[in-house]
Amino acid sequence: MDAFLTAALYKFVDLPDFVAQREPLQRCCDDNAVKGTLLLAREGVNGTIAGPEAGVRAVLAHLRAMPGLSSLTHKESWSSKPPFLRMKVRLKKEIVTLRVPELDPNKTVGQYVKPQDWNALLADPDVVLIDTRNDYEVKIGTFKGAINPDIKTFTELPAWIDAQPALQGAKKPKVAMFCTGGIRCEKSTALMKMKGFDEVYHLEGGILKYLEEVPPEQSTWDGECFVFDERVSVGHGLKPGPYELCRSCRWPLGPEDKASPHFVLGVSCPHCHNQRTPEEKARLAERQRQVELAEARGERHVGAAPRSQAVDAQD
């Protein structure tokens, strides 16, 4: 039975007293046995939490009682094992880091497009479709025809945009952007508006909402969607996919990756085997040994747990 409820959430809203809210929120999570990560900043809240259903509901109620967060929405999923082992409420400058200080998604963003209307937008030959996610996410799936900026972090996106000849000049093209759950597109479309693009669109609810609502036979999605939890990837209907994380570099590994001679469980994979020193590999091998010993005792070692990554909060 799936006993652990996971809630992914984000909201851009002005939170002038976010610093004072951290300790009460951390205490609420601890009192209700809820684990994960929540980010608080002046611009809003972002995070993923998991635990007993009653505990998660209590934390959500606490959040919605905070000034400006009464309309906070979230997405739910269930698991048989606890996805996270710790709870951290962190204060940040941004709830998703782009490092463009003058940008304010609370003031202007692109036009939301519902999943059922997304295909029609992409059928317009004048639309430039941009995947705003990181390289390891795009590797395992994206929309057909999407441009891959090949970035390692979201903070690289502004420089990539400035370097594209097709996005410069007086006449700006129509731009459609997408990400896992929507939060990165709140900032990326706000960035495009700030740069003078008039027609900017983004997929409401992100890839996850699209995969949840659009039937496979009507879909323009190709591959799997990377997610920041123990599932690693999901497909249509949000069914878990065949990928698992490399515990060394956290790259999503498919069957071919795991068949490589460079794949050593818990130690290395084809993407990182030449980036680790012998000392680092020895340390990782010992960690993997401790994980396996803990599993043999029916316990869970902290090294086996996926990190709670509040990057795209609808993951």
Image: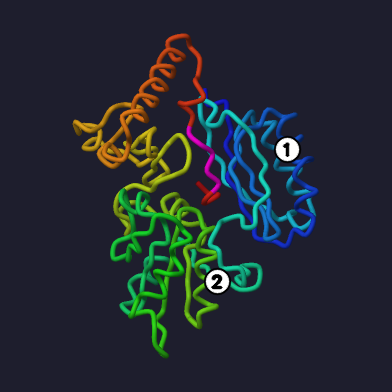
Do labels 2 and 1 touch, CB within 8 Å? no
Task: State the image coordinates of residue 230 (x, y, percent, origin top left).
Answer: 45, 34
Residue at 45% over, 26% down: 304
Q: Which mark is residue 190?
A: 2
Which secondary structure type mostly characterizes the magenta part of the structure? Answer: loop
Read off the magenta span.
Answer: 306-310
Q: Residues within 10 Å of mark 2 (few under 14, many from 20)?
A: many
Residue 114's spot in the image, x, y percent?
49, 64
* Quarter of the image where one finds residue 51: top right
- The earlier-in-sequence mark between 2 and 1 is 1
Instruction: Tell how many labels.
Output: 2
Q: Is residue 15 above or below residue 109?
A: above
Residue 210 position (above or below residue 224):
below
Name the side, left or right, on which 11 lies relative to 302: right
Cα distance, mark 2 to mark 1?
A: 31 Å
Q: Secondary structure at mark 2?
A: helix
217 or 195, nearer to the observer: 195
Q: Secondary structure at mark 1?
A: helix
Q: Please provide percent x and percent y for residue 248.
A: 38, 34
Residue 219 seen by the camera? no
In the foreground, 250 or 70? 250
Residue 246 or residue 272, whichever sits in front = 272
Residue 249, percent from left and from top: 37, 39
Does 213 appear above or below 234? below
* Residue visible at 65% across and 72% down in the picture: 107
Q: Which residue in the rendered view is the most extreme toward the top?
A: 297
Which residue type does callout 2 highlight?
Ala
Q: Is residue 307 magenta?
A: yes
Name the residue rendered at 61%, 73% in the picture: 108
Residue type at numbered disc 1: Gln
Residue of label 1? 26
Q: Coloured how? A: rainbow
